[in-house]
Image: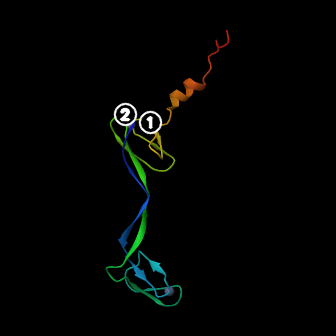
Amino acid sequence: MATIIRKVESHFVEVPVTGVICGCGNHNPYGKEETPCHCGDTMYPVLPGITEPQLVKGFVEVSCNCGRKVQCSGMTTTCKCGRDYNWNGDLLASREQWGEETGEHWTAGY
Ligand SMILES: [Zn+2]
Ligand SMILES: [Zn+2]
């Protein structure tokens, strides 16, 4: 069984705003000096100390049977050993097991 090490819920963190900003609300995080805005104004560097909330996506960290730590996010995360985990840290049936469950032997029924 894979052991769940920790679960991190999706949450917001305040991160410093960088780049340039305009009075119209337009914000370019990659701008540096004064940059012309599409509204015709000029965008100026953001004052230091201003922050904005940024979403940190949640994930589940599990300890795989092989000993590796796997961070599960998205639909399926595959460990380097080949085991698949879903977003909840549940071990998914391996491909070989799928074959065993569904594969029918030609002698079946005799
Ligand atoms: Zn503007
Ligand atoms: Zn593994």
- Is label 1's Cβ within 8 Å of ligand 2? yes
Classify residue 36 as left or right of residue 4.
Answer: right
Frontmost residue, 13 versus 77: 13
The Cα–Cα distance between marks 2 and 1, rounded to whole angstroms, is 9 Å
Where in the figure is residue 9, as x and y percent of width and height? 42, 55
- Is label 2's Cβ within 8 Å of ligand 2? yes
Frontmost residue, 10 versus 80: 10
Where in the figure is residue 33, as x and y percent of width and height? 37, 84
Callout 1: 10 Å neighbours few (<14), some, many (20+)?
A: some
Is the C-beta separation of discs 2 and 1 under 8 Å?
Answer: yes
Classify residue 27 as left or right of residue 6.
Answer: right
Q: What's the residue at 44%, 58% (across, down)?
A: 10
Q: What's the residue at 65%, 14% (across, down)?
A: 108
Amino acid type, label 1: Arg
Point out the residue furthest to the top here.
110
Residue that carries the numbered disc 1 in the rendered image = 83
Frontmost residue, 95 versus 37: 95
Residue that carries the numbered disc 2 in the rendered image = 65
Residue 63 in the image: above or below residue 16: above
Q: Quadrant of the C terminus?
A: top right
